[in-house]
Amino acid sequence: MTQQQISRLIDVPDRTLRDWKKNRHRLYNLLESLEYDEVKQKIGAVDTDDVVVFDPKAYSTNLFWQTNQTSEQKVYAIISNYLSTLNKDDIKMLCDQFGKNLVKSVLVDKYKKIYKKGYLSTSGIDIPLSGDFTQNEGYKQILSIINDC
C-alpha cells in the first residue's frame, strides 16, 4: 500500500506514518507490503469511489431526495453533500462512519476543484475566488469541525 492508502484505511495522519517510516521500520514495512484491496475488505473500510448503503435516518436531513429509505450512494457524494451543510452532528457522523482522514481528503478535493474553476456558482451568480483555498473561511470552519471529531 502507499502511504496515502495506509493513512486512509487506518485513519492515521501522514505525519505519524512518516514517523513510523523513520522509527518503526518493521511496522511501516509491514503495512506497506500489504495489498490495499485485501486490507480494505478485511477491516471493512471504504474509499471515496465505493458505493455503500446510505441510511438517511442517521443524518439530520436527507440530502438524497430520491428516497426516504436506505439507498446505495457513493461515499464521495455522501461526504461532499453533508460537508456542505456545516451541521456539526452530521460532520461528526461522517467522521465516525468513514474516518477523519477520508472526510478531510474529500474536503480538500472539493475545495481544490472549486478554486481551480476560479469561481463559485450560486443561484446563477458567479462569485470569483482568488488566493489559496486553505485561507477560505468556509474551508477553515469545516476543517475545524472535522478536527474536533
Image: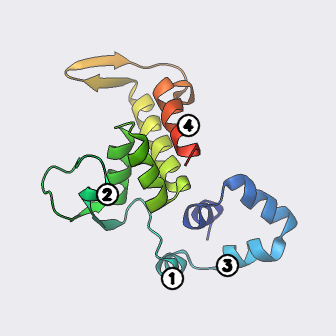
Q: Quadrant of the N terminus?
A: bottom right
Pinpoint residue 79: horizontal percent, then vertical percent: 38, 50
First in sequence, mark 3 or 1: give its number. Answer: 3
Q: CA distance from mark 1 to mark 2?
A: 24 Å
Q: Amino acid at mark 4?
A: Ser
Q: Are marks 3 and 1 in contact (CB under 8 Å)?
A: no
Question: First in sequence: mark 3 or mark 4?
Answer: 3
Marks 4 & 1, CB-CB < 8 Å contact: no
Identify the residue position indicated by label 3 in the image: 33
Query: Mark 3 belongs to which amino acid?
Result: Ser
| Residue 26 picture location, percent across and down | 81, 77
Query: Outermost residue, right direction?
Result: 23
> Mark number for residue 42?
1
Q: Which residue is mark 2?
A: 58
**Marks 4 and 1, Cα distance to the nearest angstrom?**
31 Å
Dot 2 lies on which element? Answer: helix
Q: Which residue is mark 4?
A: 144
The mark nearer the N terminus, 2 or 3, is: 3
* Mark 2 vs mark 4, CA separation in Å: 22 Å
**Residue type at numbered disc 1:** Lys
User: Does dot 3 land on a helix, a strand or a loop?
Assistant: helix
